[in-house]
Image (cartoon, helix red, strand yellow):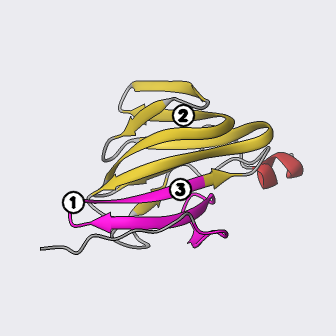
Amino acid sequence: MTDFQTMTLPDRPSEGAPDGSDVRILLRLPGGGMAHFELGAGKVSQAVRHRTVEEVWYVLAGKGEMWRKQGDREEVVVLEPGVCLTIPIGTHFQFRACGVLGVSALGVTMPPWPGDDEAVAVDNHWPLASQRESD
């Protein structure tokens, strides 16, 4: 049996996510884990795909956009409070923060995040900030 746990959202990011967003690691159980993702105003994440995990995101605050691609199917969805979306295994995705507040979301990863080599960089849908500045 797994012991129950309780925690509050950490004041500072636990680490940087492979896509460049700030992540605050929350709790996990054998079937999945939870994290808080945040991307600052005007920032764009690195596009990635996951090797073995899938995620469900729920947007808490701010505004942004999420690009997802599976084979020939691709779409951009507006990220705003109340939006919930899935990222199945192998889906290419990238998100960006619009406006002055950035965007934050709660994410559930199933199974729990296995480690640093889980996310694989893919071609970006939107250029990263450093690429835009050098153009």
Q: Quadrant of the N terminus?
A: bottom left
Q: Disc 1 vs disc 2: Cβ atoms closer than 8 Å?
A: no
- With respect to residue 7, does 94 lie above or below? above
Identify which residue is drawn at 56% across, 63% down.
9
Circle nearer the N terminus (1, 2): 1
> What SS does tag 1 mark?
loop
Place of residue 107 in the rendered image (x, y in percent of width and height, measured from the top left): 44, 50
Amino acid, disc 2: Trp
Which-is-in-front pick, marks 1 and 2? 1
Mark 2, other Cα within 10 Å: few <14 / some 14–19 / many ≥20 = some
Instruction: Give the Cα distance between marks 1 and 2.
Output: 26 Å
Q: Please give the range of residues in magenta.
A: 10-37
Q: What residue type is labelled 1?
A: Gly
Q: Can residue 123 be seen in this view?
A: no
Q: Is residue 40 left or right of residue 24?
A: right
Element carrying mark 2: strand
Foreground mark, 3 or 2, reads: 3
- In this figure, which residue is indicated by the disc labeled 1? 31
Q: Report x, y in % for residue 80.
A: 62, 30
Q: In this view, does 128 lie above or below 34?
A: above
Whole-percent x, y for residue 28 in the image: 33, 66
Q: Mark 2 points at which residue?
A: 67
- Residue 43: in sight, yes or no? yes
Mark 1 residue crowding within 10 angstroms, few (<14) / some (14–19) / many (20+)? few
At 38% across and 26% down in the image, what residue appears? 72
Which residue: 71% across, 41% down? 97
User: Residue under circle 3?
Assistant: 36
What element does badge 3 sit on? Answer: strand
